[in-house]
Amino acid sequence: MRNGFLLVISGPSGVGKGTVCEKLIAKNKDVVYSVSATTRKKRPYEIDGENYYFLSLDEFKQKISDGDFLEYANVHNNFYGTPKSFVFDQINSGEIVILEIDVQGALKVKENYPEAVFVFLLPPNMVELRKRIEGRNTEDEDTINVRMKNAEKELGFIDEYDYAVVNLDVDETVKNIESIIEAEKFRVIKGGQNG
Ligand code: 5GP
């Protein structure tokens, strides 16, 4: 059996990745969430260090040049990045680390760390997706349009993923991802360390 591993979850903005990941972590003690850094403005309900590390553009650029990110990307006109040291410390101590990142970031992780497991979360349909983003009441019309355009582009990359899960019902989705996690615990790592 393999020890810790990296589980990358992507999917369009509004698909429900945040809620799904929160539930997964609350239910599974060996699953931990990697808190990303971002230059995006904090939403009122978000907590610095819990949802994201909110950084200025200069701080973010410094971290890029220090090589602190496993991957980073410009998503919807803001920078987002995954702190590298947390991810590998946790994997090495046997944890399953969840990255909730966009498609560009996932592709970079795939290049640098192909042994990660890649899950794409799908909305039931695009109308529902728009409704969910609007229902959040946190983005203006222009931002929603950018996010919808990006969603269509992102769906084109589904072939790069190992699994696709339609998020109709959060609890059902969480169960489906738990099944994936269970199966992945038993994957044979070619030329790697199993046991
Ligand atoms: P939001 O602004 O709604 O929190 O997130 C916008 C998008 O950025 C989402 O698709 C989310 O998955 C992605 N994202 C969040 N953190 C990271 C990260 O560390 N790296 C990358 N590449 N994307 C991220």
Image (cartoon, grey):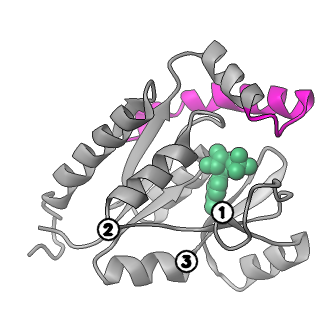
Say what amino acid the circle numbered 3 marks: Lys
Question: Which quadrant would residue 167 be assigned to in this image?
Answer: top left
- Secondary-structure class at tag 2: loop
Which residue is tagged 1?
A: 51
Q: CA distance from mark 3 to mark 2?
A: 21 Å
Q: Is mark 1 within 8 Å of ligand 1?
A: yes
Crowding near the residue tagged with mark 2, few <14, some 14–19, many ≥20 C-alpha atoms within 10 Å: few
Which residue is tagged 3?
A: 84
Labels 3 and 2: the sequence-earlier one:
2
Crowding near the residue tagged with mark 1, few <14, some 14–19, many ≥20 C-alpha atoms within 10 Å: some
Labels 1 and 2: the sequence-earlier one:
2
Badge count: 3
Q: CA distance from mark 1 to mark 3?
A: 17 Å
Labels 1 and 3: the sequence-earlier one:
1
Residue 130 drawn at (x, y percent): 70, 21
Residue 162 drawn at (x, y percent): 33, 41
> Above or below — where is 123 with respect to 187?
above
Question: Which of label 3 and label 2 is nearer to you?
Answer: 2
Crowding near the residue tagged with mark 3, few <14, some 14–19, many ≥20 C-alpha atoms within 10 Å: some
Say what amino acid the circle numbered 1 marks: Asn
Residue 185 drawn at (x, y percent): 18, 60
Q: Is residue 189 left or right of residue 75?
A: left
Along the viewing direction, whichever of 127 and 157 lies nearer the viewer: 127
Name which residue lies at 68% across and 74% down: 49
Taken as a whole, is the magenta stretch helix, strand or loop? helix
Magenta region, residue range: 136-161
Q: CA distance from mark 1 to mark 2?
A: 19 Å
